Each structure stands twice: as structure tokens, then as C-alpha cells.
């Protein structure tokens, strides 16, 4: 009976249902697999809390620990809110200057770090701040080769490290985005492992959330 109802609602002859049913099952399986894998996708991404805030801020703002990263954006909320857009204004630079840059999309954290530091430093701590760092194309290529991944670098949109201070503690999260749809989580796992290795080598201590 339910077959007849479905066929009536979809406006196709019941005799065709056996032919379409396998395709329907395949589609249903793909959708359910995508939905049920979404929580795992989030769990696999980095989500940690820095245990020594003062030392981390020193390495972030006063030392060159994070200087090789590119900066997508930064926000500091204190007496007023300061916003930094890391996107390169190409019209400002000549050809030689652009060719010498690590990226023509975003500026390096090295170039922006002092400006953010000047906003944050003072007698009072900021209410919050957020810094979004991304890996350069050359560093992405090195990471793919190091981990023997066959993913074309052109398929990788961004490998992101988010740094957020909420007035009490500093949390780090990550994201790996690709230019193509894929259920493969290898890139995410490798990126998280790379960040953990980087933090440990830099002497930055953290706990998982």
C-alpha cells in the first residue's frame, strides 16, 4: 500500500518503482552517512585550551613563534573594538614587492603582530580577542609532501588556526577546508597533528576540551 501512496505523491507509475528503488536506497544511504558523520567531523578538529596564558601571549605577540603564518583577520575588544583585515591591497604595492611576498592574498602575522600588540598592551587586559591565522600555499605544499598526501594543493582552500581569548582563557581551534566536496577526513587529521606538533616544539602547553 505504501508503494502506491509514494508513487501517487511522486506522480510516476508503480511499475517503475522497482527500477528506481535501488537509486533511492543509494541516495538515502549517502544522506544518512553525511548527517551521522557531521558530529565526528567536528570532534576530529582541534579544540584545546592553553594552560599557560602569559607565556602563550608572549610567544604570540612579542616573539616570532607564529610569524610564518598568514593572518586572515584579527579583532580586539577593549574600550572599543579594533578590527584588522589581513587581506592584501594589491594596488598599494608594485610588482617587485608583490613577488617578494609570501602570499598576495593575506599578510603575514609578522607584519601585523606589532599593530595587534600595541592595541592589546596596557594596564588592563582586553575583554576578548580573536586572531585567525592560515597556512601559506608553500607551507601547505610542504605539509602535503611531508605526510605523503596525494591531495592537489589547488584543492586545499585554507588550513586555519583560530585563537580566541574570552577574558578568562585562550582556546585554539582549527579548520581544514577544501575546494571540492569530500568525505575524506585525512587532511583534517593531518592538520590537527601538525598544529599539535608545532605547539609542542614551541613549548606551548595545552589541554584538550
Image: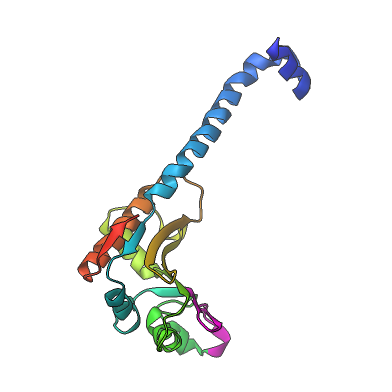
Q: Is residue 25 visible?
A: yes
Q: Does the magenta portion include 80?
A: yes
Q: In terms of image quadrants, where is residue 193? A: bottom left
Residue drawn at (26%, 59%), measured in percent from left and top?
A: 146
Is residue 8 found left or right of 120 in the rendered image? right
**Residue placed most toward the observer, 150 or 160:** 160
Q: Is residue 183 visible?
A: no
**Residue 14: % across, % down:** 73, 13
Q: In terms of image quadrants, where is residue 204? A: bottom left
- From the viewer's perspective, is residue 29 above or below residue 43? above
- From the viewer's perspective, is residue 182 above or below residue 200? above
- From the viewer's perspective, is residue 103 above or below residue 179? below
**Residue 51: % across, % down:** 28, 66
Q: What range is drawn magenta here?
A: 72-92
**Residue 134: % across, % down:** 42, 68
Rendering colour mode: rainbow
**Residue placed most toward the observer, 79 or 106:** 79
Is residue 191 found left or right of 3 in the rendered image? left
Q: Quadrant of the C terminus?
A: bottom left
Residue drawn at (45%, 43%), measured in percent from left and top?
A: 39
Q: Quadrant of the N terminus?
A: top right
Amino acid at each position: 500500500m505504501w508503494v502506491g501512496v509514494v508513487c501517487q505523491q511522486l506522480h510516476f507509475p508503480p511499475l517503475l518503482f522497482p527500477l528506481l528503488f535501488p537509486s533511492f536506497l543509494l541516495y538515502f544511504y549517502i544522506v544518512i552517512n553525511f548527517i551521522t558523520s557531521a558530529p565526528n567531523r567536528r570532534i576530529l578538529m582541534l579544540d584545546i585550551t592553553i594552560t599557560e596564558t602569559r607565556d602563550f601571549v608572549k610567544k604570540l605577540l612579542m616573539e616570532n613563534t607564529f610569524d610564518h603564518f598568514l593572518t586572515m583577520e584579527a579583532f580586539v575588544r577593549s574600550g572599543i573594538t579594533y578590527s584588522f583585515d589581513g587581506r592584501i591591497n594589491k594596488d598599494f604595492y608594485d610588482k617587485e614587492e608583490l613577488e617578494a611576498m609570501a602570499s598576495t592574498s593575506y599578510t603575514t602575522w609578522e607584519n601585523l603582530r606589532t599593530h595587534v600588540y600595541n592595541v592589546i598592551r596596557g594596564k588592563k587586559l582586553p575583554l576578548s580577542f580573536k586572531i585567525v591565522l592560515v597556512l601559506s600555499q608553500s607551507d601547505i605544499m610542504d605539509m602535503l609532501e611531508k605526510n605523503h598526501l596525494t591531495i592537489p594543493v589547488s584543492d586545499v582552500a585554507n588550513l586555519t588556526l583560530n585563537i580566541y581569548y574570552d577574558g578568562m582563557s585562550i582556546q585554539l581551534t582549527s579548520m581544514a577546508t577544501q575546494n571540492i566536496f569530500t568525505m575524506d577526513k585525512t587532511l583534517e587529521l593531518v592538520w590537527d597533528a601538525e598544529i599539535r606538533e608545532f605547539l609542542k616544539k614551541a613549548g606551548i602547553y595545552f589541554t584538550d576540551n
